[in-house]
Image (spheres, helix red, strand yellow):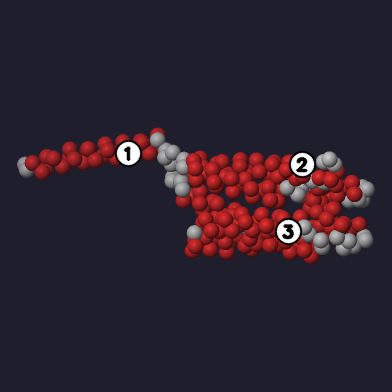
């Protein structure tokens, strides 16, 4: 029998042992999470719900300003956030019609974001994730400032639509997270995303409550 014939089983056995050892290390030692990159991703994710929920505290003022005639919208309806602005725009003198305009204003952001999500994702595949995310952050910031300066319902409606159109970070962030992790740590990285979003959802109304009605809240 030739030496090569006797060495073949030993080589095969050695390769099998190495493969098993590598497999064991793969399952027992996941790749460390890229903490610096994840912090950036989570900060952007944290800001997403804040841009929407920062308006929630105004619900209380809309209820009190209508002297109880608008209280039905406080029972779980987020759209009452815009009640005060709608009243101040003097669109209608009929309090029963205010809810209609409030619904349009509240839904405009989500509808616009629904149509802009896929285009932003395709664009990020072509020009990269970073430019799309930075543009979304800058656009959202500018639109929020413009909404605070709204002097008419048309202005406010246009700004809210623009906010949804320029913000495509929700889908792009998930793509980034998938690219900076691997199969050994991906589940752990993704598991923090809902938690960060929830914290932002809490922080938004808190910030809005502290900053709402500053002339009355902080008279000095």
CA–CA distance in space, label 1 to label 2:
54 Å
From where the camera sits, is residue 113 visible? no
Q: Where residue 207 sits in the image (x, y, percent)?
A: 73, 43
Work out whether mark 3 precedes mark 2 in sequence or the reverse, and give the earlier one.
3
Q: Where residue 219 sits in the image (x, y, percent)?
A: 85, 42
From where the camera sits, is residue 56 visible? yes
Query: How crowded is the residue under tag 1: few (<14 C-alpha within 10 Å), some, or many (20+)?
Result: few
Instruction: Name the residue beneath numbered marker 2.
Output: 210
* Quarter occupied by residue 184: top left
Instruction: Name the residue beneath numbered marker 3.
Output: 146
Q: Where residue 201 sits in the image (x, y, percent)?
A: 68, 44
Instruction: Name the residue beneath numbered marker 1.
Output: 22
Q: Is residue 201 above or below residue 84?
A: above
Residue found at x 90% / y 57% = 96
Work out whether mark 3 precedes mark 1 in sequence or the reverse, and give the earlier one.
1
Residue found at x 55% / y 58% = 132
Looking at the image, how many numbered discs can be counted on the residues?
3
Q: Residue furthest top?
A: 28
Q: Is mark 1 on a helix, strand or loop?
A: helix
Nearer the observer: mark 3 or 1; the answer is 3
Q: What element carries label 2?
A: helix
Closer to us: 19 or 201: 201
Q: Do the residues labelled 3 and 2 touch (CB within 8 Å)?
A: no
Closer to us: 219 or 105: 219
Residue found at x 54% / y 46% = 40
């Amino acid at each position: 029998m030739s030496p090569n014939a006797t060495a073949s089983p030993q080589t095969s056995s050695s390769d099998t042992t190495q493969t098993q050892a590598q497999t064991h290390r793969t399952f027992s030692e996941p790749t460390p999470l890229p903490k610096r990159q994840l912090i950036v991703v989570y900060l952007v994710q944290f800001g997403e719900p804040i841009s929407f929920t920062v308006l929630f505290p105004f619900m209380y003022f809309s209820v009190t300003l209508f002297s109880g005639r608008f209280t039905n919208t406080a029972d779980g309806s987020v759209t009452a956030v815009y009640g005060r602005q709608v009243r101040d725009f003097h669109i209608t003198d009929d309090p029963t019609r205010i809810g209609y305009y409030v619904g349009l204003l509240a839904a405009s952001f989500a509808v616009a974001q629904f149509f802009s999500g896929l285009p932003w994702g395709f664009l990020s595949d072509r020009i990269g994730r970073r430019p799309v995310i930075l543009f979304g952050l800058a656009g959202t910031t500018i639109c929020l400032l413009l909404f605070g300066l709204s002097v008419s319902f048309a202005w406010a409606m246009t700004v809210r639509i623009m906010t949804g159109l320029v913000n495509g970070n929700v889908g792009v962030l998930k793509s980034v997270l998938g690219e900076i992790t691997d199969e050994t740590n991906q589940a752990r990285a993704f598991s923090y995303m809902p938690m960060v979003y929830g914290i932002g959802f809490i922080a938004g109304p808190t910030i809005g409550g502290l900053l709402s009605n500053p002339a009355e809240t902080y008279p000095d």
